[in-house]
């Protein structure tokens, strides 16, 4: 009987040893992912610019207004980011279009997030294809109005500007009847471009 108990004890010990051997005999291998994220760049510049002053005038002898566009500021990379427009000898009903080609020189598609008119300490949203009045003296009778549009020139035409693509914007400036003689009216237009997925 003693032998039977011993045999049962040996058998139980062998079963336990075998089960531990199975538990310790598990093989494994670890997989990993090494991730590097390189971000792109949102980068735009004015590449070309012009006006239609001479085209707008019906008769050359009446060509008394001059329009001058100058490069005012470049960023740290040397990209043109600000234009200066001077209109001299303007008069009521005078109208001119200022054209600026925006190049996407970055690596991310961009869209126009918004444009803002800044004058006399005021900031006014400038939407595409809408006239905005500028009332400098606050009497309710605007001296100028402006219109922002897109030029259909084979570029992206307002959808988005892909890398190496462009869009041409037209800013129309109209001198109204309430403009005073020998007066200077100044304003600025600020364009903000953002990556394509952040603009509705």
Image (cartoon, rainbow, N blue to C red):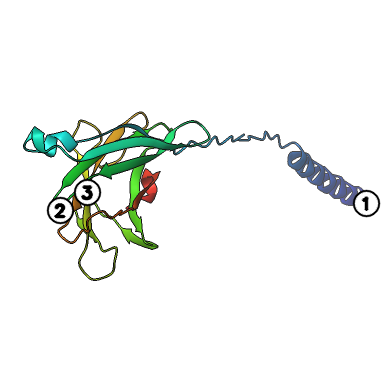
Instruction: Provide residue 93's location: percent of width, then percent of height.
Output: 13, 51
Instruction: Provide residue 3's location: percent of width, then percent of height.
Output: 91, 47
Residue drawn at the location 63% of the way across and 34% of the way down: 31
Q: Secondary structure at mark 1?
A: helix
Q: Earlier in the sequence, mark 3 or mark 1?
A: 1
Neighbor class of circle 1 (other Cα within 10 Å; few <14, some 14-19, many 20+) is few
**Residue furthest left in the image:** 58
Residue drawn at the location 36% of the way across and 41% of the way down: 84
Q: Secondary structure at mark 3?
A: strand
Residue drawn at the location 87% of the way across and 49% of the way down: 9
Instruction: Provide residue 67's location: percent of width, then percent of height.
Output: 25, 38
In the image, is 25 to the left or to the right of 107? right
In the image, is 57 to the left or to the right of 199? left
Of the two numbered discs 2 and 3 in the rendering, the one whose residue sits closer to the viewer = 2
Residue bearing the label numbered 3: 173
Q: Earlier in the sequence, mark 2 or mark 3?
A: 2
Q: Secondary structure at mark 2?
A: loop
Q: Earlier in the sequence, mark 1 or mark 2?
A: 1
Residue bearing the label numbered 2: 92
Question: As rendered, which of 147 and 196 lies closer to the eye?
Answer: 147
Spatial CA span between label 1 and label 2: 124 Å
Residue bearing the label numbered 1: 2
Question: As rendered, which of 50 and 169 lies closer to the eye?
Answer: 50
Of the two numbered discs 1 and 2 in the rendering, the one whose residue sits closer to the viewer = 2
**Marking on residue 118:** none
């Amino acid at each position: 009987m003693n032998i039977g108990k011993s045999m049962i004890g040996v058998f139980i010990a062998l079963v336990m040893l075998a089960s531990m051997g199975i538990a310790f005999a598990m093989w494994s291998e670890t997989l990993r992912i090494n991730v590097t994220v390189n971000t792109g760049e949102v980068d735009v510049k004015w590449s070309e610019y012009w006006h239609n002053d001479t085209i707008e005038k019906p008769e050359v002898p009446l060509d008394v207004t001059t329009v001058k566009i100058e490069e005012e500021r470049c960023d740290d990379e040397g990209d043109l980011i600000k234009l200066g427009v001077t209109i001299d000898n303007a008069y009521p009903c005078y109208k001119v279009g200022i054209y600026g080609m925006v190049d996407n020189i970055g690596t991310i598609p961009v869209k126009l997030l918004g444009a803002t008119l800044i004058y006399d300490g005021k900031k006014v949203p400038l939407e595409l294809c809408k006239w905005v009045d500028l009332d400098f003296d606050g009497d309710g009778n605007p001296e100028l109005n402006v219109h922002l549009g897109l030029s259909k020139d084979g570029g992206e035409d307002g959808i988005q500007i892909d890398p190496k693509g462009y869009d041409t914007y037209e800013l129309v400036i109209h001198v109204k009847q309430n403009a005073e003689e020998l007066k200077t009216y100044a304003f600025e237009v600020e364009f903000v471009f953002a990556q394509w997925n952040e603009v509705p």
